[in-house]
Amino acid sequence: MLDRALRAHGLEPVWALWDDSAVDWDRFELVVVRSAWDYAERSAEFLRWAEGRRWIENTLPVLRFGVDKERYLTALAAGGVPVIPTTFVRPGKRFEPPEESFVVKPAISAGGRRSARFEAGDSAALALVSEITAVGATAMVQPLLSGAAESSLVYLDGVYSHSLSRRAALPRGRREDVFFLEEELAPYESTAAERRVAEAALRLAPEPPLYGRVDLLGGVVLELELVEPSLYLAYGEGSADRLAAAVRARLEATLSP
């Protein structure tokens, strides 16, 4: 969908692997991050690669902000945006399983990898927290918000584009070795209140993002996706064209004297 839209706007897309050493990045006038879903396990390497790109979208400050959930959730909470209550367990910090159902995931993660849900007080969570912190990463512990599906709101060049509902069942009691968790998707039209929360979150990004997805549940932010989110263009009529137009505008801005 995006390829067709880009060509309709006079642009020729070329898909390239971010870690392919054979790619001549200087031949491109603009690099747009899209499906770099392996960045989470190699985030430092990914950011070094992004630093070497003269023109990249989202921009390097936005990518740095969006890579680490601890960084952006802390910033959003400080900025008055409602976020899911989160405890961050850094390497060497003691962890006590909460007395309510909870979720454990890495602060830098994608696709639900190395994530699981646990019942109140379940000491089995210690193994997953230890696995995350043993490699120098930070674990996140959040209450399990069950029931309704997540509302995912997509913004293109700062403007609301479309939304959908998403469900992804976290494994119980232990993490699973999967690249991404299976999702149930459905059409959904976000409320005005949800848009206000999403837009408040996006305003706290260090620079205006070309693309972004805000995942909400119960009116609070679960995730602010600014690195490589699925944008679910099929759920927003005209969204591919809007994204292509935004890419062209960003490209023209980089080429202007």
Image (tube, rainbow, N blue to C red):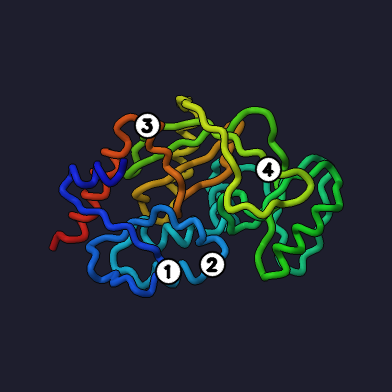
Residues under labels 2 and 4: Cα distance? Answer: 23 Å
Residues under labels 1 and 2: Cα distance? Answer: 10 Å
Q: Position of residue 237 (x, y in %)?
A: 33, 29
Residues under labels 2 and 3: Cα distance? Answer: 31 Å
Residues under labels 4 and 3: Cα distance? Answer: 26 Å
Q: Are marks 4 and 3 in contact (CB under 8 Å)?
A: no
Q: 18 or 130, which lies in front? A: 18
- The mark found on residue 19 in the picture is 1
Q: 187 or 220, which lies in front? A: 187
Horizontal relation, residue 58 to residue 192: left or right: left
Which element carries disc 3, helix, strand or loop?
loop
Q: Are marks 1 and 4 in contact (CB under 8 Å)?
A: no
Identify the residue under disc 4.
170
Please report whichever mark, 2 or 4, sits nearer to the chain's N-terminal start.
2
- The mark found on residue 236 in the picture is 3
Please report whichever mark, 2 or 3, sits nearer to the chain's N-terminal start.
2
Q: Are marks 1 and 2 in contact (CB under 8 Å)?
A: yes
Which element carries disc 4, helix, strand or loop?
loop
Looking at the figure, which quarter contains the N terminus? top left
Q: Residue at x 84, y 53 (%)?
A: 124
Horizontal relation, residue 18 to residue 104: left or right: left
- The mark found on residue 42 in the picture is 2
Please report whichever mark, 1 or 4, sits nearer to the chain's N-terminal start.
1
- Kind of residue at badge 1: Asp
Please report whichever mark, 4 or 3, sits nearer to the chain's N-terminal start.
4
Q: Position of residue 152 (x, y in %)?
A: 50, 36
